[in-house]
Image: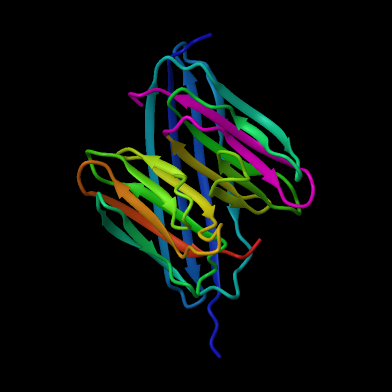
Amino acid sequence: MPQNYTFSASANVSATSTTGYSQNASGSFSLNITGVDQVATGRLDVAHDSDATIMAAAGFGRAVYVRNLDDTNFVTIYNGASSGTDPIAVLEPGEFCFTVLRSTTTTVAKADTATVTVEYFALEIDTNA
Amino acid sequence: MASMHTTYTASGSFTLTDERGVVVFSYNPSFTAETNTTAHALYGGEHLVQTGNSQLECGSDINVDRVYAFLKHVDTDYAITVLPDSGQNVEISHLKPGEFFFAPVDLNADGSGTSLRVTAATADQKLQYLICDALDN
C-alpha cells in the first residue's frame, strides 16, 4: 500500500442574525504525510448502546471527519471512550465536524436513542505533519 | 422581550491523494442549520493564545451543551491545543500553524463548562475564531 499522501482541507462557515449582522470564517491547509499505516473511510452504523470505532489508536495522531447521515437522531464523537472523555462534537442530522488530533487515543462515535449512519474518514498522520 | 434569531451554514472540502496521484477519498459536505430562535451569542475575533491556558469564554447564557466553533491557527510557530473547559482535560483538537477545527461542541459535558480552553506550546500564538449558539440536541 502507498504510504505517502497529500491531504487537503478547506472549510467556510457563516453565522447571520436577523438584524443583518453576519460573520464569516474560512480556512484551508494541506499536509504531506509519510509512513501512513491507517486510512479509514466510508460509512458506518453507530449504535446507541455501545461505542463504534472510527479509528483505533494511531501511532502519533489523525485527522478526523464525521458527518451524521441520519434524518432524526444526533450522534456524539469522542476522543477516547465515550464513558470517560469530553466529546469532540455533537452532530445533529446533516451536520459534520473536522479535527486534527495528535494523541494516541481511539476515536469513537455513539448515537443517542437509535442507530445512525455516519460518513467518515480518519487519516493517520506522522510526527512531521 | 426581544429575541435573537440566527442562521448558520457550513461547508467543507477534504481530499486525500496518494503518491501515485490516486484520489483515495474526496468529501464536500455542507449544511444549513435550522434557524435558532433562542440564540444568545454570535461572535468572532482573534486571540493571542497563552502558554498557560487561555479561555474563549462563551458565557453561561448561551447553550453550553452545543455551540458551533470554528478555530483557525493563524500564527507560524507552535501548536495550539483545544479543550472544552469542563474539567476532563481531553483535547478535542491539536492545531499546527494554518490548521483549523470545526465542530458543534459540547462545552459542558461534566456540567461545569462555559468556555473553550486553548493553550499554546512554547510561546504565545494567534488564533482566529467564530463561535455561535447552536440549537440543543
Asked which colour scheme the image uses, the reply is rainbow
Q: Which residues are magenta?
A: A102-129
Residue that lies at the very extreme toward the top in this rendered image: A1
Q: Is residue A33 above or below residue B107?
A: above
Q: The N terminus of chain B lies in which quarter of the figure?
A: bottom right
Percent from the top left, x then y, of residue B57?
38, 65
Give the percent coordinates (x, y) of residue A33.
Answer: 40, 21
Residue B13 magenta-drawn?
A: no
Could you say which is closer to the camera, residue A27 or residue A47?
A47
Decide whether residue A113 is among the magenta residues: yes
Counting from the top left corner in percent of width and height, residue B62 is at 51, 71
As drawn, which residue projects farthest toward the left? B123
Residue at the farthest bottom position: B1
Asked whether B39 or B92 is in front, the reply is: B92
Instruction: Please give the count of numbered marks on the rendered protein.
Output: 0
Name the residue located 56 percent from the left edge and 49 percent from the top edge.
A89
Identify whether A51 is placed above or below B54: above
Q: Quadrant of the C terminus of chain B?
A: bottom right
The quarter of the displayed image where residue B5 is located: bottom right
Q: Residue at x 32, y 54 (%)?
A: B128
Give percent across and percent down for residue B35: 61, 68
Residue at the image position 44 percent from the left and 46 percent from the top: B101
Q: Using the image, determine if residue B4 lies above or below residue A73.
A: below
B95 with respect to B92 (left or right) = left
